[in-house]
Image (tube, grey):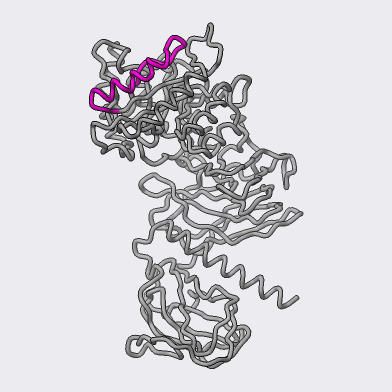
């Protein structure tokens, strides 16, 4: 009992010190609001039917999974979990083998909690909350849960019928994020009226957070203590779905807790690496079906399959990704986004060259993410589309700009772009000389027909810092360039009046006025003869006028000061697609 009191007294402070509590969408909600979370523990196969019930009632739930038992007899398999996540349900951890954590050594506690979360992350899930098996925890266990990367942990006691002085609901945010309180676990003796009473009692007392914990779902609960009959559960869900007008809503644990998914933490951390670990995908020591130091991409929806394959480029194994539905997220494989044990350490401002051997029936691309000083991972960049190929082919991609100033670790990988399959093997990562900046022509995109005298919007994006630039056009496929504007401010946007120079293969170029090697060129477009088009021509700054050019309003990202990761990603993707189209058209003309 003393240990549990120490846990309650100490782990709120622990959460503040670690900085893991950031509050969810409901953290600032009025006290009169009642929020219910449906929690299903253990990941037993009887919970498969719960998906249909949730869908019928329009509710979302949180499933706490014993990762070491996934796919074993009597338990859900990985496909079940992916369907849950794709449907919008929350996946949390419930340890590796459902051990009584208080009875374990610190080393074994760490293995049960850290390895459990690492496996869930490697399968593409985003576990932020842990449920203690048997509600067994103390201050040391709570600290281990935080050290393993969980933002919060849930008990199975502390409310209503578990003690005489217990409150009717947990607070929002919870009093102690590493000992979130619940009513008693639902047993076969708890009728519908009891579950409803947990909710209505909280409503009458001023609201709060009510977590209802389920285990087995079986029509015959005889001899099975922690069990609810499907009809009772279905009726309870239907009843809950009708209480929104009274201010009671059903939300997942993550909805309430909020907070980013923290990097994977290994049970036994190793020194940081500067190279890819397990680049040939041979090792899978924990037997979770994903190569060690790699992870599957996030589960966004759609049907995705992933498995080891003996059709290898070298060694015994490759990895097979398959996307069987066009909707939803792409199938992907990435370096594990962890605490530095697997993800290579990088030097800000340096360049990198990524490579992979692949076979594929659909286009795919290489991609990169970086971990910053705040400890979170962000998607950073993606390479050009790689064409399908029936034979093993090596593809490489030099990151088009130096790594960000706050990048300390790098994760690289591949992602499918369409329905189909890909085999990947033998990844590589090498140092490269990265340009200080890059310009990407977003418009024209190539293939357009413009008429002499027409006002055309030119757009570009900037990676890095380019203060002033020159803009030019060519009607001779870059054999010579005619200035449009020189030394103009980099606004990312201008209006160009098409000159009287008909051409079937015209190009536009933007280039740094200080370093002309930093440039972006459009894909070919056509200039057709015709009468000048009506339009208002804006006047550029003094001395900046060229052939048919005017400055427009600010656009693009200019010098990219303060540019967010998402904007950078989109700029790169758009520019690389345009360059890919240009090369394809040139190949077609040569053929």
> As drawn, which residue projects farthest toward the top?
223
- Specify the quadrant of the image occupied by residue 182: top left
Whether residue 206 is visible, yes or no, is yes
Q: Is residue 156 above or below residue 441?
A: above
Magenta-colored span = 181-208
Q: Total of numbered circles in the picture?
A: 0
Residue sitting nearer the eye, 393 or 248: 248
Task: Judge whether residue 302 is colored magenta.
Answer: no
- Write down the quadrant of residue 142 in the picture: top left
Residue 399 is situated, as x and y percent measured from the top left of the image, at 53, 61
Please state the horizontal and vertical placement of residue 456, each as a whole percent of the image.
47, 81
473 left or right of 27?
Answer: right
Query: Can residue 136 be seen by looking at this rendering?
Result: no
- Can residue 182 be found in the magenta stretch? yes
Q: Is residue 365 left or right of residue 150?
A: right
Q: Give the position of the C terminus as an image quadrant.
A: bottom right
Image position of 113 with respect to 430: above or below? above
**Camera-side residue: 401 or 470?**
470
Q: Which image quarter: residue 580? A: bottom right
Q: Residue at x 56, y 11 (%)?
A: 220
User: Is 322 left or right of 202, judged from the image as shown?
Assistant: right
- Front residue of this view, candidates 58 and 18: 58
Q: Is residue 156 above or below residue 475?
A: above
Q: Nearer the viewer, residue 591 or 231?
A: 231
Q: Provide residue 163's location: percent of width, then percent of height.
A: 29, 11
Q: Position of residue 319 (x, y in %)?
A: 66, 43
């Amino acid at each position: 009992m003393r240990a549990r009191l120490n846990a309650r007294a100490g782990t709120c402070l622990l959460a503040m010190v670690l900085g893991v509590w950031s509050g969810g969408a409901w953290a600032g909600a009025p006290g009169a609001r009642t929020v219910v979370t449906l929690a299903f523990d253990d990941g037993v196969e009887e919970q498969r039917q719960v998906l249909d019930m949730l869908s019928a009632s329009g509710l979302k739930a949180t499933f706490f999974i014993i990762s070491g038992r996934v796919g074993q007899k009597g338990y859900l398999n990985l496909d079940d979990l992916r369907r849950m996540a794709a449907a919008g349900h929350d996946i949390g951890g419930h340890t590796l083998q459902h051990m009584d954590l208080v009875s374990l050594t610190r080393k074994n506690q760490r293995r049960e909690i850290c390895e459990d979360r690492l496996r869930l992350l490697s399968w593409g899930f985003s576990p932020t909350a842990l449920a203690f098996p048997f509600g067994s925890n103390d201050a040391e266990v709570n600290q281990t849960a935080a050290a393993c990367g969980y933002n919060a942990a849930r008990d199975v006691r502390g409310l209503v019928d578990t003690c005489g002085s217990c409150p009717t609901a947990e607070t929002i945010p919870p009093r102690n994020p590493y000992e979130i309180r619940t009513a008693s676990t639902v047993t076969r003796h708890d009728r519908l009226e009891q579950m409803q009473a947990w909710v209505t009692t909280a409503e009458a007392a001023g609201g709060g957070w009510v977590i209802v914990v389920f285990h087995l779902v079986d029509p015959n609960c005889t001899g099975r203590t922690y069990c609810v009959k499907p009809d009772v559960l279905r009726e309870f869900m239907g009843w809950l779905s009708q209480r929104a007008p009274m201010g009671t809503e059903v939300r997942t644990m993550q909805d309430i807790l909020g907070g980013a998914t923290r990097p994977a933490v290994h049970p036994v951390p190793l020194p940081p690496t500067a190279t890819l670990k397990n680049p040939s995908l041979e090792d899978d020591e924990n037997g979770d079906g994903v190569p060690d130091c790699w992870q599957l991409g996030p589960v966004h929806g759609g049907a995705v399959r992933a498995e080891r394959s003996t059709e290898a480029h070298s060694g015994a194994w490759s990895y097979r990704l398959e996307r069987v539905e066009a909707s939803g997220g792409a199938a992907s494989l990435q370096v594990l986004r962890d605490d530095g044990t697997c993800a290579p350490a990088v030097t800000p401002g340096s360049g990198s060259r990524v490579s992979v051997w692949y076979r594929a029936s659909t286009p795919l691309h290489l991609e990169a993410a970086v971990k910053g000083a705040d400890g979170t991972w962000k998607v950073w960049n993606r390479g050009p589309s790689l064409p399908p190929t029936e034979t093993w082919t090596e593809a490489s991609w030099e990151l088009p700009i130096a790594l960000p100033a706050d990048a300390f670790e790098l994760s690289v990988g591949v992602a499918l772009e369409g329905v189909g399959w890909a085999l990947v093997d033998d990844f590589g990562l090498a140092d490269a000389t990265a340009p200080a900046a890059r310009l990407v022509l977003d418009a024209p995109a190539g293939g357009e027909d413009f008429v002499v005298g027409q006002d055309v919007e030119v757009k570009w994006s900037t990676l890095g810092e380019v203060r002033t630039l020159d803009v030019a056009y060519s009607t001779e496929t870059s054999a010579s360039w005619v200035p449009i504007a020189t030394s103009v401010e980099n606004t990312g946007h201008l209006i160009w009046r098409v000159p009287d120079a008909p051409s079937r293969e015209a190009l536009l170029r933007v280039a740094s006025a200080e370093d002309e090697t930093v440039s972006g060129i459009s894909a070919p477009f056509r200039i057709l003869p015709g009468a000048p088009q009506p339009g208002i021509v804006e006047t550029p700054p003094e001395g900046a006028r060229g052939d048919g050019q005017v400055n427009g309003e600010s656009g693009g990202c200019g010098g990219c000061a303060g540019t967010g990761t998402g904007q950078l990603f989109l700029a790169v993707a758009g520019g690389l697609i345009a360059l890919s189209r240009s090369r394809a058209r040139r190949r077609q003309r040569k053929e």
